[in-house]
Image (cartoon, rainbow, N blue to C red):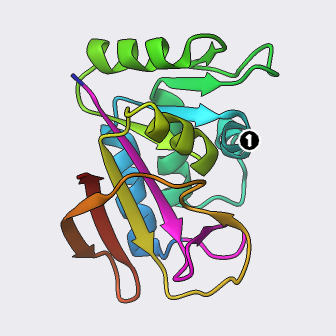
Amino acid sequence: MAKLVFGMNQSLDGYVDHMAFGPSPTLFRHFIEEAQGQAGSVYGRRMYEVMRYWDDDHPEWDAAERAFAAAWRKQPKWVVSRSLNSVGPNAKLLKDDLEGAIRKLKAEHEGEIEVAGPCLAQTLTELGLIDEYRIYLHPVVLGHGKPYFAGPRSPLRLIGYDRMDEDVIRLTYVPA
């Protein structure tokens, strides 16, 4: 059975914003390795549209960006959306019965399935479907934006912490 994992970069004050800060080369290599090993990813519409960037090659990319794009393209993707009518390569649209669809994905796959996007993560949290939360805590204060947790949730239990590079710590939590 697969484990559903929600992990994102987060500012010290709790916000996620890929345009305000990003991973160091060391952390980006970590994300490449994660993408290579994942059983797939579940996206909300907005996050999927951001990630579609990796569908097309860009001449300015370095080797790490090409490696991430290859890993992202290879893995299966499930996109939760009522407004989209189609999705890109290696992706499947989930429109109805989100809880049933995600339970089926977890039952049919092994390994980790990434959850991408705080709004989708909140919905899956409310359904009791997320198994693990990974906060990549950056030394940045944004003061506004989209919070990592899009709403209240029951208590979590810290099961691990790792220094990812000289400035970023990964905190790993599970539902208590």
State which region is magenta.
Answer: 2-22
Q: Amino acid at mark 1?
A: Arg
* Mark 1 neighbour class, 10 Å CA radius: few under 14, some 14 to 19, many 20 or more: some
**Residue furthest left in the image:** 159
Image-quadrant location for residue 107: top left
* Foreground of the two, 129 or 1: 129
Location of residue 117 in the rendering, given as x and y in whole percent from the top left corner = 59, 47
Task: Judge left or right: residue 159 versus residue 154.
Answer: left
Location of residue 50 in the rendering, given as x and y in whole percent from the top left corner = 72, 46
* Foreground of the two, 134 or 166: 134
Which residue, given by chain and number where applicable, does mark 1 sit on? 46
Image-quadrant location for residue 17: bottom right
Reply yes or no: does residue 110 show up in magenta. Answer: no
Q: At x 59% / y 35%, what residue is drawn?
A: 43
Image-quadrant location for residue 49: top right
Q: Quadrant of the N terminus?
A: top left
Task: Judge left or right: residue 172 versus residue 71.
Answer: left
Location of residue 32 in the rendering, given as x and y in whole percent from the top left corner = 41, 52
Q: At x 31% / y 69%, what residue is drawn?
A: 171
* Foreground of the two, 138 or 32: 138
Q: At x 38% / y 52%, what residue is drawn?
A: 154
Residue 71 shows in the view: no
Whether 54 is drawn above or below 174: the answer is above
Whether 28 is drawn above or below 91: the answer is below
Q: At x 64% / y 43%, what residue is drawn?
A: 54
